[in-house]
Image (cartoon, rainbow, N blue to C red):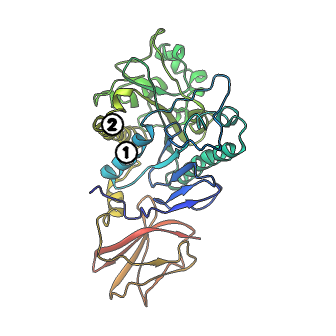
Amino acid sequence: MPRIHFWLCILLIPVQAHAQSYVPGKIYLDSNGFVEFIPGDLPIVISAPHGGYLEPSNIPDRNCAGCVYLRDSYTQELSREIREYFFLRTGCYPHLVTNLLHRKKFDANRDIVAAADGNPVVEASWYAYHEFLDSAKAMVIRDFGRGIFFDMHGHAHSIQRLELGYALTKSELQQPDSVLNTPVLVKESTIQRLEGDNFNKFDHATLLRGDSSFGNLIHRRGFPAVPSASIPFPLNNEPYFNGGYNTRRHGSLDSGSIDGIQIECNQSVRFDSLVRKGFADSLVSAMIEFIDVHYDKMIDPGFCRITALLSKERKIKPSIWPNPFMEELYTDLQVEGLKACFYDLRGRLEKCSSVQNQTINAQDLPPGNYLLLVSELGRPIWSGIVIRE
């Protein structure tokens, strides 16, 4: 049986997307039920805009000049597998936002005009999609200071390789490194923040197609990618997607703390379920290495595994309430010698106290999200995310 994160209570919570406290692992839906948001606890945001299946008859198909209606097959499944492989490797999850509608109804990688074709229901889901992404980014910035956004797509081009989009055109990528490193092209890039602030002080061209570029890291794992050290740019006669609306909007193109990369996946890594799982595993490995090298080890598997101690079936399934809370939490655990410790979401211990009369005191904690770990004689027996208002 696959492991399930201990706080992954599968709760479908219809919401109007707006600024609010989101609990990692819960499933939130927009008011139409067409957009899904599963908050995570890593500095990574995953978006799956074109893999939806729903085709409600009350929503007409889009009919706009230049519109694309084909679904990116298996990109929803791939994105969910990426999420699970992050947990298997680290004990933590990325944030995941998924469009559940078929692309013929809603294109979640376009501006609102092309995305919804004037349908007010779809327009509401368009706003929800990007508000969920904005909320995920805000959580990343709050907990880590910065992070990275991956927009997942699929292409049908004959060349079986990944196409990585940074909002730079084919002709721009064909330029020598000296040109790619000019302020003009750096300003056009969705990894602009990373170029100005990376651990090894690599320049823009090195981040795009050097030995430790994201393309090269996945290429070394057996999945050809452009740009990379092996394939530094697409040729004039070769197709290439350079990044769409989402990557431009949610990456660091116009400054900001979240970098962005569009990943266009070839059919050979998506259509076969076993190959897709192996690809997802390798992709996660490359993502972790990319973050470790350039963002100075922002992912702490040790802390994440603290949060996963109770991922297996437990005999003790207590209630902890209220959540969110003000000054105290209560539990139905009737066990002597319990200790409750609060950690911030980067793994720093904030407070420990004894559980007295089934009450957990948290009066001196500042507002925020915390991992609460309840233990008995040093043995963890319950943990989960709680919110101090």
Toward the bottom, the furthest residue is 357
Q: Which residue is mark 2?
A: 276
Q: Taking 92 as reference, is 270 above or below it?
A: above
Where, quadrant-wise, is the N terminus in this rendering? bottom left
Does residue 287 appear in this view? yes
Disc 2 packing (10 Å; few <14; some 14–19; many ≥20)? many
Contact (Cβ within 8 Å) of mark 1 with mark 2: yes
Toward the top, the furthest residue is 237
Instruction: Look at label 2 and name its amino acid.
Output: Arg
Dividing the picture into quadrants, the one containing residue 29 is: bottom right
Looking at the image, which residue is at 64% across and 35% down? 115
Looking at the image, which residue is at 54% across and 54% down? 139
Q: Would residue 183 appear left or right of 148 to someone viewing this image?
A: right
Q: Position of residue 244 (x, y in %)?
A: 57, 29
Looking at the image, which residue is at 61% across and 37% down? 105
Nearer to the camera, 305 or 277 = 277
Nearer to the camera, 48 or 358 = 48
Looking at the image, which residue is at 36% across and 49% down? 84
Label 1, label 2: how far apart the Cα atoms are: 8 Å
Toward the front, the furthest residue is 57
Nearer to the camera, 1 or 262 = 1
Instruction: Look at label 1 and name its amino acid.
Output: Glu
Q: Position of residue 319 (x, y in %)?
A: 43, 78
Where, quadrant-wise, is the C terminus in this rendering? bottom right
Q: Taking 167 as reference, is 319 above or below it?
A: below
Q: Which residue is mark 1?
A: 81
Q: Would residue 187 appear left or right of 176 to someone viewing this image?
A: right
Q: Position of residue 385 (x, y in %)?
A: 46, 66
Q: Taking 89 as reference, is 198 above or below it?
A: above
SS at mark 2? helix
Disc 1 packing (10 Å; few <14; some 14–19; many ≥20)? some
